Image (tube, rainbow, N blue to C red):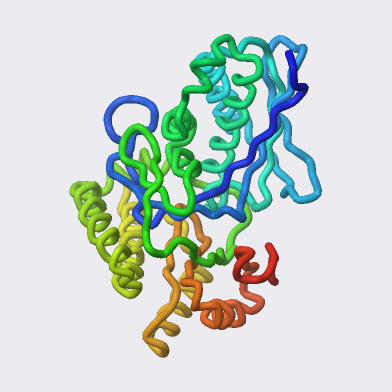
Amino acid sequence: MGLEKWRAEAPANIALIKYMGKGDGVGNRPANQSLSYTLDHLISVVEIRPHEGGHDLWNPLREESMESMALSEKGRERFLKHFDFLKVQLQIKGNFEIRSGNNFPSDCGIASSASSFAALTKAAHQMALDCGLDRGAVEALTPEEISRLSRHGSGSSCRSFFSPWSLWKDEGGEAVQFPWTHLHHQVVLLERSKKEVSSSEAHKRVVSSELFQGRASRAEKRLQKLVEAMNKQDWKSSCELVWAEFWDMHALFETSAPPFGYMTDRSFKILEMVREIWKSEGDGPMVTMDAGANVHLLYRPDQKKCAHRMLMGVGGLAQVLSSPGLTGEAESYL
């Protein structure tokens, strides 16, 4: 069979214009376009090995740099179902053991689903190049086409194939360009435990909110304005649009039937700190939140002092994961 194992990694991404709510049909088609920034320092790793048993199986990847990880039965089924889909699409025969892990906590709002499904798709693509039945067809696949395959397992994973910026329209992700080619990133890690309401379940529930009517139109208009602001390097307007967007999404959660939410008292404290920085300095980080309590902060290259101020303000409130360009190395602060 050639290689004894196939290994790939993929980064998480943070959406600035959110994918929330699904369109008609199958395969995780979004109700609206989404725009994300790729978090190259937060990665998932997947290894695939031949397995002599009668079925595929999943196990955690145990390495020093990996977080302790345990998928639920439903999570394993979803992961293996996508692998089965990939085997059909890439014409791979046989049974395999999949091992996966992250260098950051999973299931708590840092897009571990996006990075892990993207890594699985990449590893399966590598395997198909080595032992698939139609190497020529696999070699001809473009990154955009591979991202479309990944979308079937996790919608937002299609954005993790492109860096630093990715736009997801319908079928898959594509690279986009802005004058800001690199931003520093911090995530204030307020919750490490698994979410009570998964992102997949949130997509289903938000349609019951009265605010969901018009949501796709609001997101599309905000995306257009954000693209214009970022191309003009208008940081303040860009940050205001991203701020409004994540509040729009969390309002859907809180007005669903039944309502649910992710923000905690500590989330509000972090957001208030951001407001105070903007108020006192007239400048500050871009802030957003996914379906979780954790707060993501993005900084221009010239905002390192602002990032340090934010880090000192958090103090013992939470752990902060920072990008290498901000700290000199990929560090965690307590």
- Is 5 left or right of 186, judged from the image as shown? right
Tell which of 99 and 202 is nearer to you: 99
Looking at the image, the residue that sits furthest to the bottom is 280
Tell which of 179 and 74 is nearer to you: 179
Q: Position of residue 272 (x, y in %)?
A: 44, 78
Image quadrant where residue 247 sits: bottom left
Q: Is residue 174 above or below residue 138?
A: below
- Is 108 left or right of 94, judged from the image as shown? left
Tell which of 108 and 166 is nearer to you: 166
Image quadrant where residue 101 sits: top right
Q: Is residue 313 visible?
A: yes
Tell which of 164 and 296 is nearer to you: 164
Total label count? 0
Q: Is residue 152 visible?
A: no
Q: Is residue 242 above or below residue 206?
A: below
Q: Name the image quarter holding the N terminus.
A: top right
Q: Name the image quarter holding the C terminus.
A: bottom right
Q: Position of residue 213 (x, y in %)?
A: 19, 47
- Is 141 left or right of 92, judged from the image as shown? left
Which residue is found at the position 50% from the left and 52% from the top?
38
Q: Is residue 204 above or below residue 183?
A: above
Which residue is found at the position 54% from the left and 53% from the top?
110
Q: Position of residue 253 (x, y in %)?
A: 36, 52
- Is 258 left or right of 272, judged from the image as shown? left
Which residue is found at the position 54% from the left and 41% from the top?
113
Q: Position of residue 74 (x, y in %)?
A: 57, 30
Q: Is residue 291 above or below residue 230?
A: above
Which residue is found at the position 60% from the left and 77% from the top?
311
